[in-house]
Image (cartoon, helix red, strand yellow):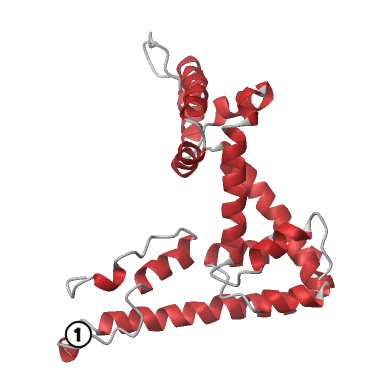
């Protein structure tokens, strides 16, 4: 498989053939950005201006705290909190709320510097996946060997730059649907089996057949987020 600066990260995330490769790609990009924000970018004025205005969602605040130094996070928060005070909630409040400021505050609450960056980068990565799938038979084979493509990334792969796939759009759709739909059907069967184990007709049976983690696997498929399964096999029948 021919590799270059664009294809290497794609190959790296597809090679394990475990879970959704696009989720691994997103996780890789998120961790790199969180480390960057709490590292070298912390003292870059242009970046700080943007992070002060946009802030971060809980997911990425948590990642920054986990990956960065506490002082770095405190300095980022200090200037961000100052920006919020100046723009929206000064110490001396006006007699009545400013509708424009309230609308802008609503936008801030739903904004995140890293989310915006990841969205743009994931779309670029999808374009590279499309190009590799069309031009490299070995990557097409690797793509077909993935465990599954989660629901969110099925949508992303099928809707970013559809024209870039040209006449191959239908074939790519069929292969991606096979990966997503096949796993979806297996999840449906596992969740159904899990539920039937609580039917009175199966009283006394413990034949869960590997479906005890079907709840966690289904949520991961639907949302792209991983719920730890430690201790799942030890659940009692009150699950």
Please give the residue where the numbered disc 1 appears in the rendered image: 199
Compared to residue 58, the image places residue 46 above or below, namely above
Can residue 170 be seen in this snapshot?
Answer: no
The residue shown at (23%, 70%) is 235
Residue 222 x/y as whole percent: 46, 65
Residue 90 x/y as whole percent: 42, 13
The residue shown at (60%, 32%) is 39
Residue 208 lies left or right of residue 22; in this view the side is: left
Taking the view exactly as shown, the residue that stands out farthest to the front is: 69
Please tell me how crowded label 1 is: few (under 14), some (14-19), or many (20+) other residues with Cα within 10 Å.
few
Q: Quadrant of residue 173?
A: bottom right
Residue 148 lies left or right of residue 132; in this view the side is: left
The residue shown at (66%, 53%) is 122
Question: Quarter holding the N terminus?
Answer: bottom right
The residue shown at (83%, 58%) is 4
Residue 154 lies left or right of residue 110; in this view the side is: right
Q: Quadrant of residue 193?
A: bottom left
Element type at mark 1 = loop
Taking the view exactly as shown, the residue that stands out farthest to the bottom is: 201
């Amino acid at each position: 498989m021919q590799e270059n600066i664009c294809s290497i990260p794609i190959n790296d995330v597809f090679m394990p053939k475990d879970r959704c490769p696009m989720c691994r790609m997103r996780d890789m990009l998120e961790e790199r950005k969180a480390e960057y924000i709490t590292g070298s970018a912390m003292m870059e004025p242009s970046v700080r201006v943007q992070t002060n205005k946009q802030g971060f969602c809980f997911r990425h605040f948590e990642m920054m705290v986990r990956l960065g130094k506490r002082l770095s996070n405190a300095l980022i928060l200090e200037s961000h909190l100052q920006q919020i005070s100046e723009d929206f909630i000064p110490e001396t409040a006006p007699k009545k709320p400013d509708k424009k400021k309230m609308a802008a505050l609503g936008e801030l609450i739903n904004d995140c510097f890293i989310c915006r960056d990841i969205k743009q980068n994931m779309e670029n990565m999808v374009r590279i996946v499309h190009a590799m799938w069309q031009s490299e038979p070995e990557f097409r084979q690797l793509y077909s060997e993935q465990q599954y493509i989660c629901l969110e990334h099925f949508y992303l792969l099928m809707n970013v730059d559809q024209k870039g796939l040209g006449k191959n759009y239908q074939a790519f759709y069929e292969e991606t649907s096979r990966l997503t739909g096949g796993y979806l059907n297996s999840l449906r069967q596992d969740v159904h089996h899990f539920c039937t184990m609580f039917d009175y007709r199966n009283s006394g049976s413990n034949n869960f057949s590997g479906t005890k983690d079907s709840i966690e696997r289904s949520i991961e498929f639907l949302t792209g987020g991983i719920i730890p399964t430690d201790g799942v096999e030890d659940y009692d029948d009150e699950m």
